[in-house]
Image (cartoon, grey):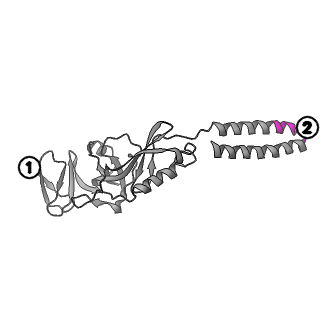
Amino acid sequence: MASMKCTKCGAPVEFDVGDKFVKCSYCSSQIFIDRSGAGFYYALPFAIGESEAVGIFRRWAGGSTRAKDLDKLAQISSLKKQYFPVYLFKRDVNGMEQIHVEPAASTTLPGLHSLKVPGGDLKIFDDKFDAGGAELIKPDIEMAPYLEQLPGTPKEQALVYFPIWRLDYVFEQRRYVVVISASSSEIFSGDFPARSSGAYMLVAGVGFLAFLGEGLLALASTALALGLMAITVVGVFVAANFVARRM
């Protein structure tokens, strides 16, 4: 048996070598242990439900940079409620507190390197915490490599289970995935069907050439050139509006 002091109340806590988590018998805090030390063990409750997550995705999919009608045509193939583990580091850097969040599990999902953990919402993860049926992803990355790169001196370190919705969807026979923060409603996507800019470039190019020709015509007939420019302005506006609505 090994022992250490509880990182919350200071009471002695015994654990077996190889244990990853241990509960303080005095204050009931759940503590995680790795080769670099010990820290608190927290979780964030889900702030958005399944239907809200789908609504957030649909609104995001309707954005101007996404493919036309992606919000209507994207077929959701799966929606998973998960708790993803991250390390939360509080550091003292020249008298100022800095907070760093890093993944505690291997992943290729987008956005999990830039999650924001709201400190006031953290709940101690113990046997009373209700995970609400969410899948708990196990940590498989040690804390030590992060500690070597962080600035300043440590104030607190913790393992935090962060709530996310993983949404997989299909568009034009290709699969995509987004991650929705169930804490802040942020949405992260590494790859998505983008709206083509070719039609916009064509409209801009034709308009530029028309204005160039009309500028040269103005040397001979200013009135005629101004009339043609007015027609060109209307034409470019109509064409751009058509592209925005149809493409």
In the picture of the structure, the residue carrying the numbered disc 2 is: 220
Judge the density around disc 1: few (<14), some (14-19), many (≥20) Cα neighbours within 10 Å.
few
In this rendering, would 234 be left or right of 159?
A: right
Q: Are marks 2 and 1 in contact (CB under 8 Å)?
A: no
The answer to whether residue 203 is magenta is no
Q: Is residue 45 above or below residue 167?
A: below
Tag 1 or tag 2, which sits nearer the N-term?
A: 1
In this rendering, would 41 be left or right of 165?
A: left
Q: Secondary structure at mark 2?
A: loop
In the picture of the structure, the residue carrying the numbered disc 1 is: 1
Where residue 237 appears, x then y in whole percent?
73, 46
Where residue 50 appears, x then y in whole percent?
40, 55
Q: Secondary structure at mark 1?
A: loop
Q: Quadrant of residue 65?
A: top right
Q: CA distance from mark 2 to mark 1?
A: 97 Å
- The structure residue drawn at horizontal position 26% and vertical position 60%, both measured from the top left corner, is 129
Q: Is residue 178 visible?
A: yes
The C terminus lies in which quarter of the figure? Answer: top right
- In magenta, the rendered stretch is 213-221
**6 or 46, which is in the foreground?**
46
